Amino acid sequence: MPKHAAAIARFSDFLQQQGLKLTSEREALVREIFSIHYHFEADELLFKMKQNNVKISRATVYRTLELLVKSGLVRRVHLGEDHYHYEHVAGNSHHDHLICTACGAVIEFHDEELERRQREVCEKKKFTPTFHNLQILGLCDACRRRGEQPDAPDRVKMIGQGAMSLRK
Amino acid sequence: MPKHAAAIARFSDFLQQQGLKLTSEREALVREIFSIHYHFEADELLFKMKQNNVKISRATVYRTLELLVKSGLVRRVHLGEDHYHYEHVAGNSHHDHLICTACGAVIEFHDEELERRQREVCEKKKFTPTFHNLQILGLCDACRRRGEQPDAPDRVKMIGQGAMSLRK
DNA sequence: GAAGCAATTGAGACTCAGTCTCAACGAAAC
DNA sequence: GTTTCGTTGAGACTGAGTCTCAATTGCTTC
């Protein structure tokens, strides 16, 4: 069975629990999201839907993304830019991001020791964590070799990604 | 000497290096920023300046914040909301944030072991870090005792902060 | 199958943080 | 005094995300 089928089933369950319905629009969105194997932006999703001749409004895209985040199927991440990116969760577990400020590459990683230490810090502060978000900005191996200079940490250019806005 | 005097001196040096000038507007902004001992938003700063009868435009506030970030005197942070917050750096070193999703409290912490492990992860991935950003969302001690439920991780309400926009 | 009803949708207006433009200003250099 | 060049403010603009509202869809229940 294709990857997105399981996601659609899980989303359908979630919606039912909430007294909501799995409409054709929502299904098409999940299908599209689970065919993107990378971080994406809301507008990018809208653009791809139009490309596939699926008629859907911006409001529905945002509304569905919110539901997907609530259901745990999609995660909202900051990648150094001033708006959100999303990524589907699928079977793959939690991870954090290394972001190259020169070429925009995003490298995912997961480190159990880091996670453990975060839990310890929270315990010390009597804080009950539910979620965290770690981005490390810097230079990837290729860019460092190419002699790129690290960018100012305040602004990250995301080259070769996004930039597919639909609104004129 | 008051705290902001040292900051103004450092900013002045930075500006001179860049062939720029320390104007009265820039000085007033630094003075204001270093009198705020918390995270602030750009519009909040603008609002406080008006309250103090310092005439300054939004453009200048944003332009100066950019310069301050470049100079290292101010840091731009994500605190779970979809726009930036800023914090002055003063003498105090790098830290990360625990953010309570119930009451909006922001707890700063610094943990050397966490920092060290991050460097190790970067090394393993041949990544040269310049900067990182870690937010842990969850419940602070008081809210947990009060029996608050953790909020959905996708949206963080920031109660008792900000909400002082100037534009009608 | 019609009626009732709530969830859903799309179009487009709206919001709001942040950016850009441009004319006017002002301090130092010639 | 004139030129130069950084700086400023006002306000137009941008772009992501939200909201509104009328129209539609898809159940239930008779």
Image: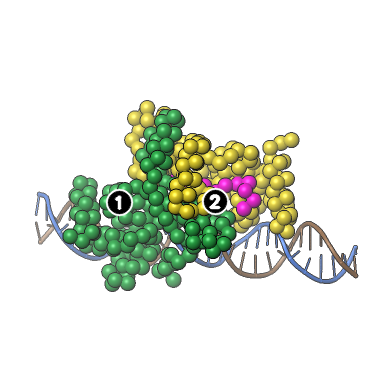
Chain colours: A yellow, B green, C blue, D brown
Does the stretch in magenta take in A72? yes
Q: Which mark is residue A46?
A: none
Q: Position of residue B12 (x, y in %)?
A: 20, 53
Mark identifier at residue A130: 2
Residue at left offset 38%, top offset 64%: B44
What is the crowding at mark 2: few (fewer than 14 residues within 10 Å), some, or many (at least 20)? some
Looking at the image, residue B29 sits to the left or right of residue A13; the answer is left
* Vertical placement of residue B119 versus A24, above or below: above
Of residue B102 and residue C7, the one placed in the foreground of this image is B102
Left or right of B40: which side holds A15?
right
Label 1 is placed on what type of residue? Asn
Q: Position of residue A119 (x, y in %)?
A: 49, 45
In front of the other: A8 or B66: A8
**Which quadrant is the N terminus of chain A positioned in?**
top right
The percent position of residue C23, horizontal first and vertical second, equals: 29, 63
Q: Is residue A70 above or below residue A90?
A: below
The one of B164 and A13 positioned closer to us in this rendering: A13
Instruction: Name the residue carrying label 1.
Output: B92
The disc numbered 2 marks a residue on which chain?
A
Residue A137: in sight, yes or no? Answer: no
Measuring from the top left, give residue A76's x and y in whole percent. 55, 49
Q: Which residues are magenta?
A: A70-82
| Relative horizontal placement of residue A56, taking residue B145 as reference (left or right) | right
Q: Residue at x 44, y 29 (%)?
A: B124
Instruction: Label 1, secondary structure: give it.
Output: loop
Residue D10, located in which quarter of the rendered image? bottom left
Q: Nearer the viewer, residue D17 or B52?
A: B52
Kind of residue indicated by mark 2: Thr
Determine if marks 2 and 1 fall on one subunit.
Answer: no
